[in-house]
Structure formats: C-alpha cells, structure tokens
Image (cartoon, rainbow, N blue to C red):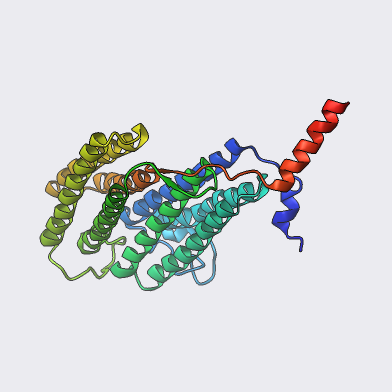
Amino acid sequence: MSTPLSYLAGRLQPSARAVRVVCLAALVMSVVIVVTGAAVRLTASGLGCPTWPKCTADTLAPTAAMGIHGVIEFTNRMLTYVLCAAVGAAIIAARCRTPWRRSLTRLGWAQFWIVMSNAVIGGITVLTGLNPYTVAVHLLASMALIWVALVTWERSKEGDGRPEPLVARPLVQLSYVLVALTGCLMAAGTVVTGTGKHSGDSSDVPRIPLDYDRVTQFHADFAFVTVGLTLAMIFVLRAVQAPAPARARARDLLVVLLAQGLIGFVQFFNGSPELLVGAHLLGATLVWVAALRIPLALRVRPELPEAPAAADSAGHTAGLVTAG
C-alpha cells in the first residue's frame, strides 16, 4: 500500500551524508529544547501561559498583558515544532535512503513519539501549577529523547549488520554500568531542582519537601562515584588497548564531568544564580551524551551483505556493458 513516505521515497534520494546531517540536527534540537526549557524556569516564566494547549482560555498566543513571561513560555512551546521538523526530516531521510534502513526509520519514529509524549507531560506540568514531580518527569523524558536521538545519529554512521564487540564483554558491561550511574546522577539532579529555589514561577509553587543541602550532597556523592568509575574506565580501556575512539570518548566524559562539577560547586556556594544554573543544565545534557557515546564506541556494525537480487542485477548489468 502506498503511503506519503513511500511516495517520497520514490522521488527523493538523500545521500548518506545528508542522512547523518539531519539526524545530527535532531540531536542538537533535543539539547536546545532542554536549555530553552531551563530558560523558562529560570526566568520564572513557567506559568507565563497559564493553561495548555492554548496560552490562555481564549487565545493560542500570549496577550500583551502577559508581558515577557508569556512570550518566553510561548516561544519555548513553538520550539517544539522546530524539534518536530528536525525529527520529521530525520524520518523522511532515513525512509528515502536506498537501501531503506528500517532501523533508522524506527528510531526516528521513537523520537517523534517521545516528543509528543513530553509535550503532553509539559501540558500536565502547566495544568498542575509546576508540580515539582511532573517537572522532574518532563526533564527525564527530555533526556530519554536525547538518548534516542544520539543513538539515531550514531547509527546513521554505521551499517545494519549485527554488532561486533571490539573489547571483552566485561568491559562492555562496565560501560553499561557507567551509563546507568550517569542516569542516576541525572535523576538525582531533578530532585535537587525540585527542592531548590528556582520553582519556575514567581507565585507560591510547591517544592519537594526535602532538605536542600542534604539532597545536594547526595547529588554530589553520585557525581564523585561517576567520576571515579570514569577514571577506572579510562585506565582499563588504555590497559587493554581499546580502540582510540573509545578511549577518547572516556576522556571526553571525564572533562565534562569535571567542568560540570566545578559549575555545580560555584553555583551552590553563590546562591544558585540563574546563569550558572542554566550552564549546569546544559552541562548535564553534555555529560549524558558523553556517557552514552562510550558503549557505542565499543562495537562496530558492518554493512549488511548486498541482497542477492540486487547483486544479480548488478552482475547482469556489468555483463551487458562488457558485451557491448
């Protein structure tokens, strides 16, 4: 049965580089939407549009009476459409590429549904008056989107063959533990956010009823453990002469972790100024990306063998050319 995507596939033929570019664009936009969401919270614009999906009960866009907060919140909502466009471009490029890479198409659709789900979560966040628990879920869903977008981009540079490990299985498992620990670090950060002073609006927004200093210390402890495991990963990768890209990615993770830790300490001891909090959230996305890239560098995916029918067709054509 013909579909709009199959129709486009018959008329478009993006290059492999074009597919990689649009997949990277989707990844970049998934990071941008996190940063702009942080800007909404740090400028106390979370309820700039007090309802959802409209900005007010009667208008889609903010009114002049809502001021700059309405503009900031509405702009962040509109950026969701830019993100959808980037994800849509990745889906179309993957579908139109010959041979059709179904795995990339599925990953693209996974991004789309995460975006749609997170838009609903964002709406619930507004309708519940910036409940800190839904704010945390909103951010974690964004991190899930970054995960899938990163995998999509990395897969666009590989083949579709079965993954072939480049190091021993225990080292691959260690990389998974590092990713899981980094995910716990992200989750602990959302608890810090939920107990902190930047609630997202100037009104009386409820906070998570925990001691801020203790929660921050708990988050810092997770960071110390993550740094320690990253150092262990660096030494082990070097000891076993792992591929250079894997060793480089482990070093990248250490660098962004240390920079993130420095920002976090300065932020804590200076009363959490908005600019540093925003930089810390950007750093969180970079830490997450750096951690996820390590296990992806510990295996390769070769190209699938050419389909027999395609090979026979190519051989027949070559024979005709030779005969001619």
- Residue nearest the observer in this picture, 139 or 271: 139
Where is residue 71, by image quadrant?
Answer: bottom left
Does residue 131 appear in the picture of this structure?
Answer: no
Callout count: 0
Q: Quadrant of the C terminus?
A: top right
Where is residue 217, by image quadrant?
Answer: bottom left
**Residue at the extreme right of the image, as rendered:** 324
Please report the residue visible at 52 percent of the width from the left and 55 percent of the height from the top: 107
Please report the residue visible at 57 percent of the width from the left and 48 percent of the height from the top: 90
- Residue nearest the observer in this picture, 53 or 243: 243
Residue 12 in the image: x percent, y percent?
72, 44
Q: Is residue 213 above or below residue 276?
A: below
Instruction: Please give left or right for residue 171 compared with residue 156 in the image.
Output: left
Q: Is residue 230 above or below residue 193?
A: above
Residue 176 in the image: x percent, y percent?
31, 53
- Residue nearest the observer in this picture, 208 or 262: 262
Does residue 111 appear in the picture of this structure?
Answer: yes
Residue 239 in the image: x percent, y percent?
23, 35
- Residue nearest the observer in this picture, 266 or 44: 266
Q: Quadrant of the N terminus?
A: bottom right
Where is residue 259, by image quadrant?
Answer: top left
Residue 290 in the image: x percent, y percent?
33, 43
Instruction: Please give left or right for residue 125 compared with residue 74 in the image.
Output: left
